[in-house]
Image (cartoon, coloured by chain):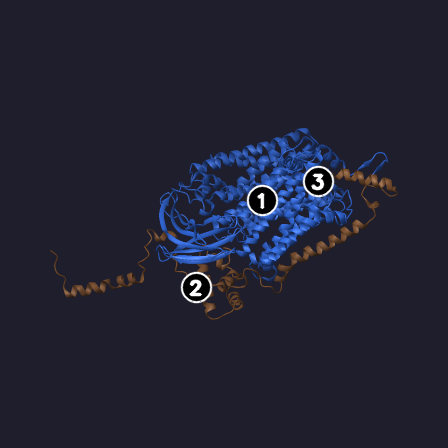
């Protein structure tokens, strides 16, 4: 037979169980807990509208995660779920968005805090223009020179052919020469 | 066994030095005994390095954790396939693997090269021996795979979970085979320079090797993209990472070489350029290794930073200087034998093709090195990521795609206006039709539109070539169309295999356009909850979270989250993405949890689902859903490209004895009746 619980004991029990009850109420009881919650990596919060905001995604795609992964913040935070840097950087972006900063202002704030390396591509200014333009300029210049040389060589008379002296060939000989070269190509 | 492996490495080093000396002296003096010795040294190197590789594999399979390499890259519960792939999963093992494969290639080159090119073989043996000895020396003095620990760990650390993927078993060896086999064309180029016999002989001797190397590089790069796509979990396959770029660089220069070689073979032109291209390709293969192993540029693919970078830098500089001197000293002998007859000719288009390929290689190299250059010039670090590379390289890539179609349409030597009109009419009309169609459907991305239009143009040129060739055979020989087609390809493997390769390239470009239209969505879902997404084609996908199951597997603990997928209300199936916590044989976590994407691939698009984690340790799951259009075509393009490469490689499709003889004599066509030499 169980002894009846006294009023004082009941009160103390209620006080002791109160934190448990508060935690229990905070948890969503409609979702079952996992058997091994620690095996799925870093605990995650529920997704908010910020995570799918096109403006935020666009800004984050232009900013580099500082964890050393070479990825942008958006890709890193949605890929490398062990990274602790990208969620923090994402929160920083959200903080700046909540301050009504524009995309360029957010990028500038990151550059001010982390340096130019925070951007996924160098800003188009000063020496960085060399990075963007040098390959194109080099290809264009070489291409123009190549075209000029080709046109010049192609216009040169046939006597310049290496190891050959075809000057003074009659029309018939030139036709036979052409036919022979055609056979050579076939 | 490791003592045997260590001994084998030392012997390989001695043999490498011996092979270099006797190869050079044998070639220089024409001493048959020395030449024979150089050849046998190549075989002996392959044999002795096989012993070293077998020794390391035995240590891996037998769980000899006293060997530092085994303890670092294997564990008791690692599946056998991954124990074997651990051979090249770490720094020192991959160096040994490199030397081993190179020794096999060098021996095969000595064994298989036709006797008419025997004059090149001693010098080629000397070069391959030097390169093999270099890799063995790096393994011995900077990253020894047989180094022992002072104690015996109970278990090894295991292989990085991202490397525990079938793609990773095949991808690195393929890429290595590509990198390593470039040494053979390089060795023959050096041999040709030493012997001063700079006709087309050396080009014919290396033709198959060049193609083989290019095919291996192509397969390696494509498999690397596939691995990145299925394993890294970011939903893409190419991120312009420095290590990815390092594999792309020699591919570009080797592609340029494959084209410019044709001009030397056909017209005796571009001799200097070809020697330079082979040298640059070899240097870039070493440069890629330097980047991966030195830690000079940060990359997710890099090996641990170590002192091996200095070895590679020294080798790169000394090898570059030597090659520059050798080429310069033979400069006069490398004069062109023929003259360009018209600026509108196949030759001219190949010049521009080479310009763009090498220009793109420069552009990729420039972007890869720009962070270092910026720091040197400005003292400021910058990041050079995909936005930069896409901006700089997409226009070059599109110009290349256009030339892929233009080049084959222009006749050798000189194209007449009638010739141009006849060949260009159909492909241009097809491209115009596609362009109009794209405008009509209001395709939003400019570059994607240009790429698809050019793809139609190039496809038109390829189909036209096949149709005309088959039709001509049908008319001339009375063969039915199927037989005519088969014989057309079979008897002109190089030409038509090349067109199939071009078709593979077109397919790649079409697939790449899909990246402009991918859709992403993150969502946290309780069991039974759904989220919807619209694809680029306008289809509505519904993803319903089924639940999360957890279970133990061989060397890992798995949390698997499943979604039920429906398209436009029709059920498609269940996709399950996993979180894997790898454990050692004592059940202790060995790495951070990794993610396995769930992918449903169709020709139209891929559904790519990632289980990002659990909300507060419950079954409420965080997902990232991606719809990637046209990804399957990347792998199809790779398969087409390799198929085309195999056709060109197939024995018997090479130049005839007559054309070889003609090429080696020089480009003098005789007109006997007139007695005129041209």
Q: CA–CA distance between discs 2 and 3?
A: 66 Å
**As drawn, B603 above or below B390:** above
Chain A: drawing colour:
brown
Q: Quadrant of the C terminus of chain B?
A: top right
Question: Dot 1: few (<14), some (14–19), or many (≥20) neighbours within 10 Å?
Answer: many
The lab-note entry on whether marks 1 and 2 share a chain reads no
Q: Residue at x 42, y 63 (%)?
A: A48
Q: On residue B218, which mark appears?
A: 1
**As drawn, A111 above or below B327:** below
The lab-note entry on whether marks 1 and 3 share a chain reads yes
Does the residue at mark 1 contact the one at mark 3 (Cβ under 8 Å)? no
Chain letter of disc 1 in the image:
B
Q: On residue A49, which mark appears?
A: 2
Q: CA–CA distance between discs 1 and 2?
A: 42 Å
Question: Dot 3: few (<14), some (14–19), or many (≥20) neighbours within 10 Å?
Answer: many
Can you give x and y, in whole percent of width and height, for residue B472 in the image? Answer: 70, 38
């Amino acid at each position: 037979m169980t002894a009846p619980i006294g009023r004082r004991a009941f009160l103390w029990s209620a006080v002791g169980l109160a934190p448990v009850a508060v935690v229990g109420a905070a948890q969503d009881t409609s979702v079952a807990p996992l058997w091994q919650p620690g095996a799925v990596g870093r605990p995650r919060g529920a997704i908010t509208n910020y995570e799918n905001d096109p403006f935020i995604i666009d800004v984050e795609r232009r900013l580099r995660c500082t964890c050393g992964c070479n990825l942008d913040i958006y890709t890193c935070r949605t890929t490398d779920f062990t990274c602790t840097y990208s969620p923090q950087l994402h929160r920083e972006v959200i903080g700046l968005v909540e301050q009504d900063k524009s995309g360029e202002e957010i990028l500038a704030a990151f550059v001010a805090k982390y340096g130019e390396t925070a951007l996924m591509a160098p800003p188009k200014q000063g020496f960085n223009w060399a990075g963007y333009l040098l390959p194109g300029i080099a290809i264009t210049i070489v291409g123009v020179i190549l075209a000029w040389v080709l046109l010049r060589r192609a216009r040169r008379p046939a006597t310049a052919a290496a190891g050959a002296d075809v000057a003074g060939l009659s029309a018939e000989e030139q036709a036979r020469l052409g036919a022979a070269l055609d056979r050579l190509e076939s | 066994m490791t003592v045997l492996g260590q001994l084998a490495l030392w012997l390989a080093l001695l043999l490498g030095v011996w092979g270099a000396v006797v190869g050079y002296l044998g070639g220089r003096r024409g001493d048959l005994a020395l030449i024979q010795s150089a050849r046998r040294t190549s075989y002996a190197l392959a044999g002795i390095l096989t012993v070293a590789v077998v020794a390391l594999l035995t240590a891996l399979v037998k769980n000899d954790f006293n060997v530092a390499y085994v303890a670092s890259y294997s564990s008791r519960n690692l599946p056998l396939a991954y124990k074997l792939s651990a051979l090249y999963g770490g720094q020192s093992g991959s160096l040994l693997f490199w030397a081993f494969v190179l020794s096999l290639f060098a021996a095969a080159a000595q064994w298989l090269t036709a006797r008419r090119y025997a004059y090149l073989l001693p010098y080629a043996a000397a070069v391959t021996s030097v390169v093999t000895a270099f890799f063995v020396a790096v393994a011995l003095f900077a990253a020894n795979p047989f180094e022992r620990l002072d104690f015996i760990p109970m278990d090894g650390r295991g292989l990085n979970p991202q490397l525990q993927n079938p793609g990773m078993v095949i991808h690195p060896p393929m890429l290595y085979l590509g990198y390593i086999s470039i040494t053979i064309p390089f060795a023959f180029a050096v041999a040709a320079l030493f012997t001063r016999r700079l006709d087309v002989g050396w080009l014919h001797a290396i033709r198959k090797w060049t193609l083989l190397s290019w095919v291996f590089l192509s397969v390696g790069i494509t498999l690397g993209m596939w691995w990145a796509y299925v394993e890294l979990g970011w939903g893409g396959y190419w991120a312009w990472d420095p290590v990815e770029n390092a594999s792309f660089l020699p591919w570009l220069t080797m592609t340029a070489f494959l084209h410019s070689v044709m001009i030397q073979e056909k017209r005796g032109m571009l001799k200097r350029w070809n020697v330079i291209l082979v040298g640059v390709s070899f240097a870039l293969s070493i440069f890629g290794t330097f980047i991966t192993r030195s830690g000079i540029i940060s990359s997710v693919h890099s090996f641990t930073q170590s002192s091996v970078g200095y070895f590679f830098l020294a080798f790169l500089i000394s090898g570059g200087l030597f090659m520059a001197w050798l080429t310069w000293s033979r400069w006069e002998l490398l004069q062109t034998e023929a003259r360009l007859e018209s600026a509108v000719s196949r030759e001219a288009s190949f010049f521009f093709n080479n310009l763009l390929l090498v220009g793109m290689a420069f552009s990729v190299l420039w972007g890869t090195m720009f962070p270092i250059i910026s720091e040197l010039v400005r003292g400021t670090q910058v990041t050079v990521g995909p936005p930069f590379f896409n901006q700089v390289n997409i226009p070059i890539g599109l110009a290349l795609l256009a030339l892929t179609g233009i080049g084959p349409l222009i006749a050798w030597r000189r194209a007449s206006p009638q010739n141009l009109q006849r060949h260009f009419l159909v492909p241009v009309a097809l491209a115009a039709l596609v362009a109009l169609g794209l405008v009509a459907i209001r395709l939003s991305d400019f570059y994607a539109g240009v790429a698809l239009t050019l793809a139609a143009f190039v496809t038109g040129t390829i189909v036209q070539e096949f149709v005309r060739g088959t039709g001509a055979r049908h008319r001339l020989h009375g063969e039915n169309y199927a037989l005519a087609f088969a014989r057309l390809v079979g008897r002109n493997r190089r030409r038509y295999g090349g067109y199939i390769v071009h078709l593979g390239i077109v397919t790649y470009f079409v697939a790449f356009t899909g990246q402009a239209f991918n859709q992403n969505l993150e969502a946290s879902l309780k069991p039974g909850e759904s989220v919807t997404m619209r694809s680029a084609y306008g289809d509505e996908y519904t993803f319903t979270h089924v639940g999360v199951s957890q279970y133990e597997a061989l060397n890992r603990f798995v949390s698997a989250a499943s979604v039920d997928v429906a398209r436009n209300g029709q059920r498609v199936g269940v996709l399950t993405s996993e979180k894997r916590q790898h454990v050692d044989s004592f059940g202790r976590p060995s790495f951070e949890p990794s993610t396995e994407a769930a992918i449903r691939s169709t020709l139209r698009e891929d559904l790519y689902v990632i289980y990002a984690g659990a909300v507060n340790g419950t079954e409420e799951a965080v997902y990232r859903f991606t719809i990637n259009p046209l990804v399957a075509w990347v792998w199809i393009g790779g398969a087409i490209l390799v198929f085309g490469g195999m056709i060109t490689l197939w024995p018997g499709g090479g130049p005839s004895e007559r054309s070889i003889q003609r090429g080696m004599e020089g480009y003098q066509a005789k007109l006997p009746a007139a007695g005129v030499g041209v």
